[in-house]
Amino acid sequence: MASSKTMLAVGLAAATLVVFVVVIAMGGALRAGLAPWPGIGVAVLAIAAFAVSRERRSFVVAGLLAASGVVGVVYALIRTDFLMASSFPGPIFGIILGLPILGLAVAEAVGATRDRRSSSSTPRVPRRVRVFSRVLEFLLAAGVPLGGNRLVTIRGRKSGLPRTTFLAIIEVGGRRWVWAPWGEVHWVKNLRAAGRATIIKRGRREDVTATELDPTQRVRLDGETWSEISTMGIVGNFGEDASHPLGRRVSVEREKVRFVSGDTECVAWHYPGTNGACVIMAGGGAVTKEPGTDLFARRFHDAGFTVLAFDYRRLGESGGQPRQIVRVAEQLADWQAAIAFAPTLPGVDPTRLAVWGFSLSGGHALPRRGA
């Protein structure tokens, strides 16, 4: 469903085209006694349409702006009095107006393409990560020890050909685990389909089976919970039954809640407390609530505090498009919305609210102290 801002941008872009068409129907701005106001109006409408759609670019807006630019240039070349001002005789003014609008249309289309890719079901791994991965693969193939990083060969789900990539393998108590921080990328889909892989370490190859944890199973490492981490990717283990005690369900003492922020919803974990006080928290920067706040939320909860740990919009389980984008103004607004929502939770005293954050979220939390 299109947002209100997108609809407004479409309306402004359509108005840009309508002004062009109406002036043409009237025989040109000079003949209608309107010059130079149609040109000024067209420029203002086009720029406004582009500015309003900055959060979510639209192909519809791009098409309308492109049509306006083409109309301006073509008609100005045919009728030299169109949008003519005394300082711009002939078709020059129409061309000067039409070409920038075409530029806005191209920029709008490029942005819409980028937004569509970022919201697709298959996440796009950042270019810097792909480049760094190639470097690590080269070093691992050369036998350079790089901690828990290993080359892993998995059969392609479509081609059937072996595909080799590097993965960070977590080893605890003789068990090995792998995590996909970028979600449903190709190696994840291949591993799920194949159910087995080959781990390569300094030329030694080891065939292993792979088991994906279901939603009721999570990993506990060294007593620290990685809870619901599959919201960021897949947690699985190589060569062992996932029913091992290391895989356990997260505490059922929390519930998922939602609150409105801006034009979307933020998703949060609510840990009911007993002392009436509530701690509101979020992970740093683009870190989601599970890996960013779980350990700390449980400590506060064990001490009797209610905890509201949320994902910023565009991240984790919260809404908002495009995805994986950090905008400070929006995150500050999400904090305000979370603070306003916290007193509505059962057993929370509105006068006993605290905020907690680290990294970028720590900076966000500081101005909220007097809220």
Image (cartoon, rainbow, N blue to C red):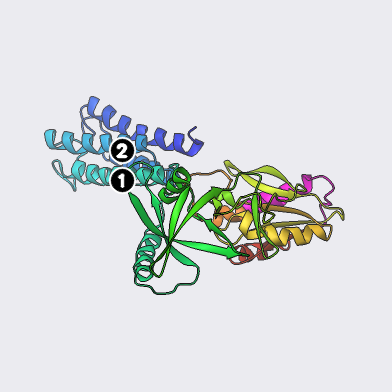
- The image shows residue 173 at horizontal and vertical percentages of 63, 65
In this view of the protein, can residue 47 be seen by the observer? no
* Mark 1–mark 2 CB contact (< 8 Å): yes
Residue 146: name its quadrant: bottom left
Would residue 44 be counted in the magenta stretch?
no
In this picture, residue 51 sits left or right of residue 78: right
Q: Is residue 31 above or below residue 40?
A: above
In this picture, residue 313 sits left or right of residue 196: right
Crowding near the residue tagged with mark 2, few <14, some 14–19, many ≥20 C-alpha atoms within 10 Å: many
Mark 1: amino acid: Leu
Identify the residue under disc 1.
Answer: 104
Q: Is residue 104 above or below residue 282?
A: above
In this view of the protein, can residue 338 be seen by the observer? yes
At 51% from the left edge and 62% from the top edge, which residue is drawn?
A: 169
Q: Measure how far apart labels 1 and 2 are at the Cα level.
A: 7 Å
Identify the residue under disc 2.
Answer: 65
Question: Is disc 2 placed on a helix, strand or loop?
Answer: helix
Q: Which of 230 and 14 is in front in this view?
A: 230
- The image shows residue 347 at horizontal and vertical percentages of 85, 47
Crowding near the residue tagged with mark 1, few <14, some 14–19, many ≥20 C-alpha atoms within 10 Å: many
In this picture, residue 296 sits left or right of residue 329: right
In the image, which disc is placed on residue 162?
none
In this picture, which residue range is highlighted in magenta? 334-352
Would residue 340 be counted in the magenta stretch?
yes
